Amino acid sequence: MREKRRFVKSDARPKSKGHFRNAPRSENESRSDGRAPRSFRSDDRGSRSARVDYAPRSYGGAPAAVDERFIWGTNPVLELLRARPNEIERIFVGEGLLSPKIAGELLSRAREARVRVDKVPRERLGAMTGGGVHQGVVAEVGQFDYATLDALIEKAKGQSAPVIVVLDGIQDPQNLGAIIRSSHAFGAIGVVVAKDRAAGVTGVVAKASAGALAFCPVARVVNISRALEELKAAGYWTVAADPNSKEALWSGKLNGPLAIVVGAEGPGIRDGVLERCDFRLNIPMSGKVASLNASVSAAVLLYEVTRQRGPATNVQTTVSDA
């Protein structure tokens, strides 16, 4: 077993924080004119916003995909309001669809952050989300600003045993969002995804993360194999979830800095990526189904890391049905 490597300094590339970049505002929508923020406002009076086309756009060639400017659901929107409200351009709420408690906090935080809130019909929210479960609220944000791998490594320098989740070929946005949710719940530093042939951060991902996206950085890299080599150079052990491995999950010593690698359902982790992993562990199963959902596999691995190390003390989690 090689000696534990020390962290290396990151290069001089700019480090983004994995946030949404504010989209350019029109002159009429600027909040820098000193006017007081607006509360719930009906959009049926022929206003400029009422004439905007919010029909779903195509994404990656798939029909009826959703505009990437929108995130929806009470947890994702509220968590973004709590953590980084400056990244929200505008919030749309459905008429009579929010509980008084949720509506009260949302309006209060939006007013404090000077975020415009518009009241719109249920059908409008459905068009924005492509029929997704919006729970009565949609937020318009800028383009998602991915973190860099160097930024994740730098962020982890204060921890003795950080964990980073690396995804190889995950194309389902629901899986990506669920993995981000589990990663944050079990204290991972962040998630790494590929730039090509992989799901990026969208409203569907934000909804599936149940608000965790506001706290868990997502880095996007050109080459997953090269990213693993960089993590190794920084002192990380790389562990792959491999159903063909003969070594059971609980037999591995999951201490020290770890990069947990999870592949897509079906193809799994590519051979070139597997070759760069220090360990390959399988999740023993007794049922007739031979594989697990990718997000479930990631959650099982992350739980085993937490079980071996003891409960995390720096992450507070709650159970939600979002």
Image (cartoon, rainbow, N blue to C red):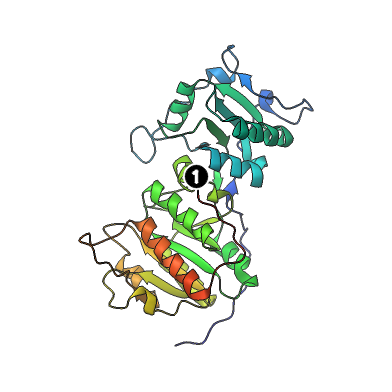
Where, by quadrant of the figure, is residue 148 drawn? Answer: bottom right
Instruction: Looking at the picture, tell me which residue is in the foreground, 50 or 312.
Output: 312
Q: Quadrant of residue 245?
A: bottom left
Above or below: residue 233 compared with residue 260:
below
In the displayed structure, does residue 17 sit left or right of residue 269? right
Q: Which residue is found at the position 57% from the left and 39% from the top?
A: 77
Vertical side of 229 occupied by 223: above or below: above
- Give the amino acid type for the residue marked by disc 1 in the picture: Ala
x then y, percent, for residue 135:
49, 33
Q: Secondary structure at mark 1?
A: helix
Give the residue drawn at x 44%, y 52%.
178
Residue furthest out toward the left: 288
Structural crowding at the residue carrying mark 1, measured as other residues with C-alpha within 10 Å and reported as few (<14), some (14–19) or many (≥20) = many
Q: Position of residue 199 (x, y in %)?
A: 41, 49
Left or right: 104 as drawn, with respect to 190: right
Quadrant of the rendering where the N terminus is positioned: bottom left
Q: Residue at x 44, y 70 (%)?
A: 304
Q: Residue at x 58, y 17 (%)?
A: 43
Residue 67 location in percent, x, y? 46, 34
Position in image of residue 41 (x %, y %): 63, 20
Q: Is residue 121 visible?
A: yes
104 and 171: which one is in front?
A: 104
